[in-house]
Image (cartoon, rainbow, N blue to C red):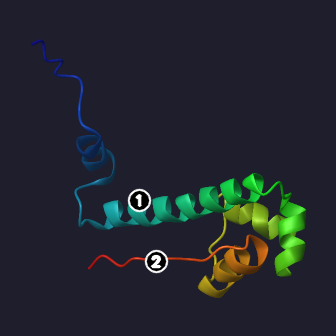
Amino acid sequence: MITDKRITSFDDHLDEQYGKVGTESRQEFQEEFETFKIGVLIQEARKKQHLTQQQLAEKVGTTKNYISRIENNASDIRLSTLMRIIREGLGGSLKLSLDV
């Protein structure tokens, strides 16, 4: 079996780019990634229901610009707003997990 020494695992890549797990830089990366995932999940659910950003915004009493900012990872979102978007706008429910 030939091993290419230039190939690294994804975990090794993250360690190199953002620091080891537990470091401040790695924690920041992981938090930003979770925020990014929320935006993608909202966008996918909205598109699956054939809603525009404007339609979703009207259903939850916010603006198209705010929905766009959430979907594009450019805005912090309050938990109450996230729950309203999911429940009232998309007809879903939010499930959280906590790793300590």
Amino acid marked by disc 1: Phe
Q: Secondary structure at mark 1?
A: helix
Q: Residue at x 65, y 81 (%)?
A: 83
56 left or right of 23 in image:
right
Q: Nearer the viewer, residue 31 or 54?
A: 54
83 left or right of 5 in image:
right
Q: Residues within 10 Å of mark 2 (few under 14, many from 20)?
A: few
| Disc sitting over residue 96 in the figure | 2
| Residue 84 in the image, given as x and y percentages of width and height | 71, 82
Looking at the picture, does residue 5 appear above or below residue 51? above
Q: Residue at x 89, y 65 (%)?
A: 55
Figure quadrant of the N terminus: top left
| Disc sitting over residue 29 in the figure | 1
Figure quadrant of the C terminus: bottom left
**Rendered image quadrant of residue 86:** bottom right
Whichever of callouts 1 and 2 sits on the residue coming sooner in the sequence is 1
**Rendered image quadrant of residue 74:** bottom right
Numbered disc total: 2
Q: Residues within 10 Å of mark 1 (few under 14, many from 20)?
A: some
Foreground mark, 1 or 2, reads: 2
